[in-house]
Image (tube, rainbow, N blue to C red):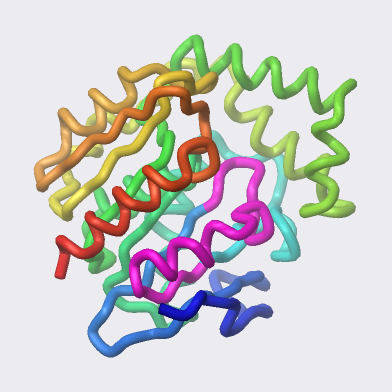
Amino acid sequence: MRAASITGSGFFVAAGGRIEYARWGTAKPGAPVLVLLHEGLGCVGTWRDWPVVLARATGREVFAYSRFGYGASSPAALPRPLDFMDREGRAILPRVLEAAGIAEPILIGHSDGGTIALLCAAAGETPLRGVVTLAAHAFNEPRCIEGIQVAREAFRSGPLRGRLARHHGERTDDAFRGWCNVWLDPEFEHWSIEEALAGIEVPLLVVQGRDDPYGTLRQVEAIAGRVNGPRETLVLDHCGHSPHRDRARTTTGAIARFVAGLG
């Protein structure tokens, strides 16, 4: 099979703003598009070359976009509301998919993107073939708070700001503060989407690293234990917060099998 490459990239308008996007692979009639939802500090560019690998492994088209406030998409209003992930999953993501001409996708979300995918599926208003989460959160917990405190210090005095600036440019400070300030807000300490998970009936693959500095395996238990559709879990040894990078071959293979099983 020939290696996939970017088949389209640029911008379109959705949900009242400009959306940066990229596509890899070739669309096939009747085959679901794999839609990538980035982490809290991510964008199209932070997926690196993994969309190419994923498109080749699954034989499916892969689509990624940058949420408002990230990459080259329109800015987001700050401070972000504490329910920003719920708004993304239930209100903004469906409009992005419609504008991109994508029907019945498989959502693949990393970290915050995984939570957004779960909330979209829980709403039950957007037809989906399935959902894959990579290090998603169902609730806030001490390990997550501690991990974000470490990230805050790395942004203030370490190399993190420079690494993020390559992707977010002049919006780097806003992108970081918008994410960090929500997760460390005292009112967010008891945030949870556990009750909403019962609304998920589509097939689900939950992936998490055993060494994730932002979440314990209680996240996997909460997600898999509360949904009402078919679910699989994959807990990876020697893996941190980014299974698609830390254990790329295993993660990609598991997703390829999951996708193939959906028909």
Residue nearest the observer in this picture, 159 or 14: 159
Location of residue 161 (image quadrant): top right
Image quadrant for the N terminus? bottom left
Q: Is 59 one of the magenta-colored residues?
A: yes
Q: Is residue 232 above or below residue 183?
A: below
- Quick check: 67 left or right of 89? right
Residue at the image point whose x is 60% and y is 78% from the top: 6
Where is residue 62 drawn, in percent x and y? 45, 70
Which residue ends up furthest to the bottom in the rendered image?
29
Residue at the image point whose x is 49% and y is 70% from the top: 63
Residue at the image point whose x is 59% and y is 41% from the top: 40
Where is residue 156 drawn, in percent x and y? 86, 23
- Quick check: 176 left or right of 138? right
- Span colored in magenta: 38-63
Q: Is residue 175 above or below residue 69?
A: above
Residue at the image point whose x is 46% and y is 38% from the top: 247
Q: Is 46 one of the magenta-colored residues?
A: yes
Which residue ends up furthest to the front in the rendered image?
1
Q: Is residue 105 above or below residue 102?
A: above
Where is residue 221 drawn, in percent x and y? 23, 23
Where is residue 55 drawn, in percent x and y? 44, 69
- Quick check: 139 left or right of 76? left
- Quick check: 83 left or right of 48? left
